[in-house]
Amino acid sequence: MALTDPQSLTIGANTRTLPRVSTAPGTSTYTDVDNGVEYVVSRQVTSKRIRTSIRINQSKIAADPITAVNTQLSASVYVVFDSPITGFTRAELKDLGLALGTWMAASTAANLLKVLGGEN
């Protein structure tokens, strides 16, 4: 079962509308072609584990600071929920995901900026 179409993401102060461009068993992809944004939600189930991945990819053209030649670049951010088939409820996994999101957003994202700056 896929999420509603389209999906909306706010990147910085800009809300992006991403229509679904593909659906395969366990995976849906939503894309804002004009702004180089792709949103992928996937789920893999094995005999012992469930892995749910939520991923945002963005690509852009940027000048190389040395050669000034324009190059296509990309970046990705993703979260993976990896759990056993039984033993954890969806509510417990949701709480773990929200705890991570809250930690990253704390103090206007100060914790996230620290980690991105190399702290661990």
Image (spheres, grey):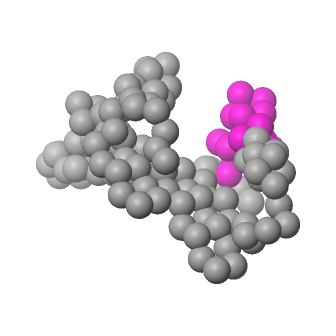
Q: Nearer the viewer, residue 105 or 23?
A: 23
Q: Is residue 36 magenta?
A: no
Tell me what residue is drawn at x 46 percent, y 33 percent. 4
In the image, 91: left or right of 116? right
In the image, 101: left or right of 26? right
Q: Which residues are magenta?
A: 99-115
In the depicted structure, whether residue 104 falls above or below residue 76: above
Q: Nearer the viewer, residue 79 or 74?
A: 79
Q: Is residue 106 magenta?
A: yes
Displayed quadrant of residue 33: top left
**Farthest left residue in view:** 69
**Farthest bottom residue in view:** 47
**Farthest front residue in view:** 1
Tell me what residue is drawn at x 69 percent, y 79 percent. 48
Tell me what residue is drawn at x 46 percent, y 59 percent. 26
In the image, 17: left or right of 8? left
Q: Main secondary structure of the magenta part?
A: helix
Displayed quadrant of residue 21: top left
Displayed quadrant of residue 43: bottom right
- Across and down, in percent, residue 83 comes to 73, 67
Tell me what residue is drawn at x 23 percent, y 42 percent. 61
- Across and down, in percent, residue 85 comes to 73, 70
Q: Nearer the viewer, residue 74 or 92?
A: 92
Q: How many marks?
A: 0
Image quadrant in which the C terminus is located: bottom right
- Across and down, in percent, residue 69 comes to 14, 48
In the image, 19: left or right of 82? left
- State whether residue 100 appears in this view: no
- State whether residue 95 appears in this view: yes
- Across and down, in percent, residue 23 comes to 35, 51
